[in-house]
Image: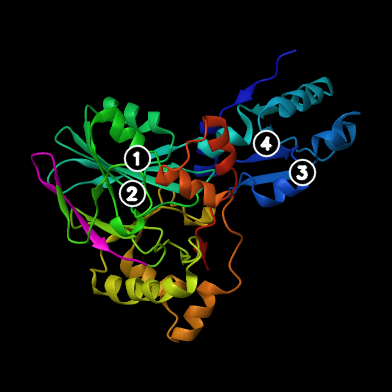
């Protein structure tokens, strides 16, 4: 008996294109409640695999006849078995190839726009985790910002575009996902930049990323200018690219703002966060396109799958940018915070180079939703 697989990329396209999909998620209830595949035209039920061992007859009545059905589990095995059981009952259902682990790791490249003097800017949407990475390409040279640990997609994409990776930046020391920046730099000979205020405990060599740093890309001199913007971490640094785009790291998102507590210093950093958002960013041009390092909810995606909005629009619409009372702001970002990201302490240690978990452990460390924001 053979049932068909649906890849994470196929599911991502259904989410982005708002196509109908029904998901039977057979993970345990707590895992489903914590994190699931989401989208505007997705329906789902959660029935744990162990409740289906004696048969799927009862769940069949809950499945629709007018949309594709996808069975989802953590790693794939259980969903294959349930899809086979459904097939025996005459239900056409696919399983998610690689399970939620594959969903967590899939990156969808989306072109954000053209650069003024030639070149292109791409956003890599990690749709199952809410992470956003970037690659600017000009005259055969590439710069990467906030790369994930799935390094092959960046190496392959640059090769496909005929570009040599010259510069790699991390806007800050990440706590919710493992950076691939250092590994890409080692593979390509590119320069790896990290804010020094976030790098006091790192055990590897890096180039200091400081406010005012300008890096040219290609003969057309596409400028990538660093803007010190602490608050999420003490070293958080934003980028202005080509005088068009503002890459905000985890300071500012489309529908929320960054949390200051992932290093245990919320009370110390909340003033920096407000200063960055309400003073430093307020001095920038409203027409700059904000490109964050994460998104929190699917509604932040545009129709083409990108996550981007004008800074001026966010100052009108983002609640986190419109709290006049300083104490109210302080309370919002230090009290009633969402749970910490899974394994965030070990993720920080990995990004410092202090520990080197194997690939399977790294996957487990990253499982779960984005939790870098406060709303």
Q: Let me know if residue 177 appears in the view.
A: no
Cα–Cα gap, marks 4 and 3: 17 Å
**x and y, in percent, of residue 44 in the image:** 71, 44
The label nearer to you, 3 versus 1, is 1
- Residue 222 painted magenta: yes
Q: Which of 108 and 196 is in front in this view?
A: 196
Distance between the alpha carbons at the discs numbered 4 and 1: 40 Å
Magenta stretch, main secondary structure, is strand
Q: Answer yes or no: do the residues labelled 4 and 1 have beta carbons within 8 Å?
A: no
Which x, y percent locates residue 371?
A: 54, 56
| Image mark for residue 170 | 2
- Residue 269 location, quadrant: bottom left
Tag on residue 181? 1
Q: How many labels does the image show?
A: 4
Sequence-wise, which precedes: disc 4 or disc 1?
4
Residue placed under numbered mark 4 in the picture: 67
Q: Check disc 4: other Cα within 10 Å, few if <14, some if 14-19, many if 20+.
A: some
Identify the magenta region: 216-230
Alpha-carbon span between mark 3 and mark 2: 37 Å
Q: In the rendered structure, are the residues bearing label 1 and label 2 in contact, judged by CB atoms less than 8 Å apart?
A: yes
3 and 1 marks in contact (CB < 8 Å): no
- For numbered disc 4, what is the local secondary structure? loop
């Amino acid at each position: 008996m053979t049932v068909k697989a649906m890849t994470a990329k196929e599911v991502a396209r259904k989410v982005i294109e708002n196509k109908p999909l029904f998901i039977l998620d057979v993970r345990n209830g707590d895992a489903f409640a914590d994190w699931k595949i989401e989208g505007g035209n997705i329906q789902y039920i959660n029935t744990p695999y162990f409740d289906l061992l004696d048969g799927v007859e009862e769940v069949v009545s809950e499945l629709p006849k007018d949309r594709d059905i996808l069975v989802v589990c953590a790693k794939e095995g259980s969903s294959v078995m349930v899809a086979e059981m459904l097939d025996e009952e005459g239900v056409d259902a696919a399983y998610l190839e690689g399970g939620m682990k594959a969903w967590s790791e899939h990156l969808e490249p989306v072109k954000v726009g053209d650069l003024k003097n030639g070149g292109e800017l791409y956003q890599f949407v990690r749709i199952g985790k809410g992470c956003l990475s970037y690659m600017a390409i000009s005259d055969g040279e590439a710069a990467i910002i906030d790369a994930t640990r799935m390094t092959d997609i960046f190496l392959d994409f640059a090769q496909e575009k005929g570009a040599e990776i010259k510069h790699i930046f991390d806007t800050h020391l990440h706590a919710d996902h493992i950076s691939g920046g250092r590994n890409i730099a080692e593979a390509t000979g590119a320069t790896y930049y990290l804010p020094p205020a976030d790098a006091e405990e790192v055990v590897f060599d890096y180039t200091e990323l400081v406010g005012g740093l300008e890096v040219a890309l290609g003969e057309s001199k596409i400028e990538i200018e660093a803007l010190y913007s602490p608050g999420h971490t003490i070293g958080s640094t934003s980028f202005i690219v080509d005088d068009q785009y503002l890459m905000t790291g985890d300071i500012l998102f489309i529908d929320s703002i960054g949390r200051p507590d992932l290093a245990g210093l919320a009370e110390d950093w909340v003033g920096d966060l407000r200063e960055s958002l309400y003073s430093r960013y307020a001095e920038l041009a409203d027409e700059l396109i904000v490109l964050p390092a994460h998104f929190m909810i699917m509604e932040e995606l545009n129709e083409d799958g990108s996550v981007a909005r004008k800074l001026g629009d966010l100052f009108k619409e983002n609640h986190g940018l419109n709290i006049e009372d300083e104490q109210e702001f302080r309370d919002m970002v230090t009290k009633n915070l969402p749970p910490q990201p899974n394994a965030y302490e070990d993720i920080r240690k990995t990004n410092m180079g202090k520990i080197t978990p194997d690939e399977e452990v790294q996957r487990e460390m990253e499982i779960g939703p984005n939790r870098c924001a406060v709303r």
